[in-house]
Image (cartoon, rainbow, N blue to C red):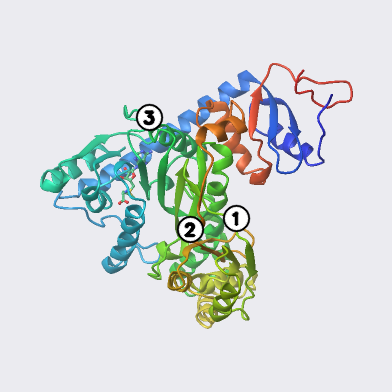
């Protein structure tokens, strides 16, 4: 009998057919929320051409970034880890040391909070994180694509008796470095994924990380650049650099050009939300805005993600509070929480005070008349009131009341807004074991799956809502069709 075919199946099939190398595709979906199976017939010649082209592009990108960092680290005297190379996009000057220290303190605290014991750090650079986290660990392996970083860091490590258990190696992020499954419990990638060639490469890196974790542990991905906010960010940067007389249309052109030419990999938070469906061993991914407000591009536009592998999942919120900008207040949230007992609760779409000016500037630039100049626009932006809430205040409120607090980018609220989860620590549940979840998602899914599946998953991420990406891909020679045009899963 043919499976029931929901109306949105056609959209998923169309998205699959738009992926390179897919000759035919058919999708079976059960009831909403059930998993979706995709049958795919490949055009092997087209796959080969696309893979060769992408591998060449990826290689070129990896080599280019490796050489950028080799050049940067050439200047390192190996005395100790430093903030060399951290420059403000607004001035071209180094980001003030005090701000970088805040950024590093918070990163280190977040990694330490995971209770790491055996660590693999990918892209360890010159050891900013390693130097602070490794002393509390049993083993720590640092790898970096730039041999110069490894050499400089080795000299520093040799000066520190408390880092004798640290090992360093040149290595690229997809390399498992000979680690056996379960050799580490924590994988750290801080401020690295933006130098990855594409999302497919990142999925491959995460699949390797899941393997070396042996199906249980955490992956800390830090300092991720927010893709959805790229145009807002670049509008603020270009406005800062523009000469007074530059016209609004020219300014808009500058913004579009830098957005188009962006070489780094920026990621939407939805990429991480989708990971449990992409790699079955992953039980959850928690996104966190930077807590410390350094009023710089790092605290405004970057975020961290903790990926739980076979670990606890946050309970679904039992109550939700849609934030009403201009009307809602922290006092109101505190009173609301008191009415809920210890239920886990979510506040949705809080206007983000850190971005109020930049968002206003972005809109002003977008709508400005042709006669307006950069000087006019700068004046208009300076006059914008900094409305909205500071994310850090929600952490303070929740912690005072005894909750675990997660402040993440909002999936439903306006651009740049954030959601806050107040979670009773006693109610965090344990996720399904990787084997249970893997079985449910089908044999071909996830970390162990071949490159073609990863390729399709990465490509579908930009074409479909995350919830519509099939959980199982079956690569077949021809589609098993029955008379009424549906797909017979047994066929
Ligand atoms: C901005 S630095 C961050 C260093 C360190 N994680 C920190 O937080 O200070 C990025 C580092 O990632 C390394 N890197 C970039 N792409 C890589 C890749 N594909 N595999 C391994 N390392 C990579 C670079 O060589 C560089 O040392």
> Mark 3 against mark 2, which lies toward the viewer?
2
The residue where tag 1 is placed is 316
Give the position of the C terminus as an image quadrant: top right
Residue 88 x, y percent position in the rendering = 36, 63
Residue 175 falls left or right of residue 230: left
> Real-space Cα distance between discs 2 and 1?
14 Å
Residue 271 falls left or right of residue 86: right
> Mark 1 against mark 3, which lies toward the viewer?
1
> Real-space Cα distance between discs 1 and 3?
31 Å
Residue 176 falls left or right of residue 484: left
Looking at marks 3 and 2 on the same chain, the residue that comes earlier in the sequence is marked by 3
The residue where tag 3 is placed is 181
> Mark 2 against mark 1, which lies toward the viewer?
2
Front one among 89 and 313: 313
The residue where tag 2 is placed is 426
Q: Please report contact status of discs 3 and 2: CB closer than 8 Å, yes or no.
A: no
Is 324 above or below relative to 93? Answer: below
């Amino acid at each position: 009998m043919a499976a029931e075919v929901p109306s949105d199946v056609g959209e998923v099939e169309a998205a699959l057919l738009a992926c390179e190398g897919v000759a035919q595709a058919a999708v079976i979906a059960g009831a909403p929320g059930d998993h979706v199976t995709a049958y795919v017939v490949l055009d092997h010649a087209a796959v080969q051409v696309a893979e060769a082209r992408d591998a060449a592009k990826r290689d070129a990108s990896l080599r280019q970034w490796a050489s950028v960092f080799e050049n940067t680290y050439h200047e390192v005297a190996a005395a100790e880890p430093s903030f060399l190379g951290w420059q403000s996009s607004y001035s071209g000057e180094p980001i003030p040391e005090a701000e970088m220290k805040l950024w590093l303190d918070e990163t280190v605290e977040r990694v330490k909070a995971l209770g790491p014991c055996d660590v693999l750090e990918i892209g360890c650079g010159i050891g900013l994180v390693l130097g602070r986290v490794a002393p509390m660990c049993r083993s720590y392996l640092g790898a970096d694509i730039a041999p110069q970083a490894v050499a400089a860091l080795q000299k520093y490590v040799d000066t520190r008796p408390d880092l004798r258990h640290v090992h360093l190696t040149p290595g690229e992020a997809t390399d498992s470095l000979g680690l056996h499954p379960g050799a580490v419990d924590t994988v750290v990638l801080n401020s690295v994924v933006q130098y990855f060639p594409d999302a497919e490469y990142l999925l491959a890196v995460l699949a390797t990380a899941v393997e070396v974790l042996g199906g249980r542990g955490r992956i800390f991905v830090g300092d991720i650049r927010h893709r959805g906010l790229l145009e807002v960010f670049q509008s603020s940067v270009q406005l800062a650099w523009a000469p007074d007389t530059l016209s609004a249309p020219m300014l808009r052109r500058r913004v579009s050009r830098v957005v188009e030419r962006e070489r780094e990999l920026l990621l939407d938070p939805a990429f991480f939300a989708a990971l449990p469906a992409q790699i079955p061993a992953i039980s959850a991914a928690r996104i966190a805005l930077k807590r410390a407000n350094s009023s710089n591009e790092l605290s405004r536009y970057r975020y961290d993600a903790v990926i739980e592998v076979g670990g606890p999942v946050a309970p679904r919120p039992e109550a939700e509070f849609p934030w009403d900008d201009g009307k809602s207040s922290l006092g109101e949230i505190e009173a609301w929480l008191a009415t809920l007992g210890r239920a886990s609760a979510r506040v949705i779409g809080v206007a983000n005070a850190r971005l109020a000016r930049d968002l206003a500037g972005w809109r002003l630039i977008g709508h400005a008349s042709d006669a307006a100049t950069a000087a006019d626009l700068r004046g208009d932006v300076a006059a914008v009131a900094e409305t909205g809430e500071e994310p850090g205040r929600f952490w303070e409120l929740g912690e005072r009341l005894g909750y675990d607090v997660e402040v993440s980018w909002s999936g439903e609220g306006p651009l740049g807004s954030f959601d806050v989860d107040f979670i009773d620590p006693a109610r965090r549940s344990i996720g399904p074991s990787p084997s249970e979840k893997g079985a449910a998602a089908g044999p071909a899914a996830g970390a162990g799956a071949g490159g073609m599946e990863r390729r399709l998953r990465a490509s579908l991420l930009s074409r479909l809502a995350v919830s519509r990406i099939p959980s199982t891909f079956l690569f077949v020679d021809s589609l098993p069709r029955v008379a009424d045009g549906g797909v017979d899963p047994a066929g």
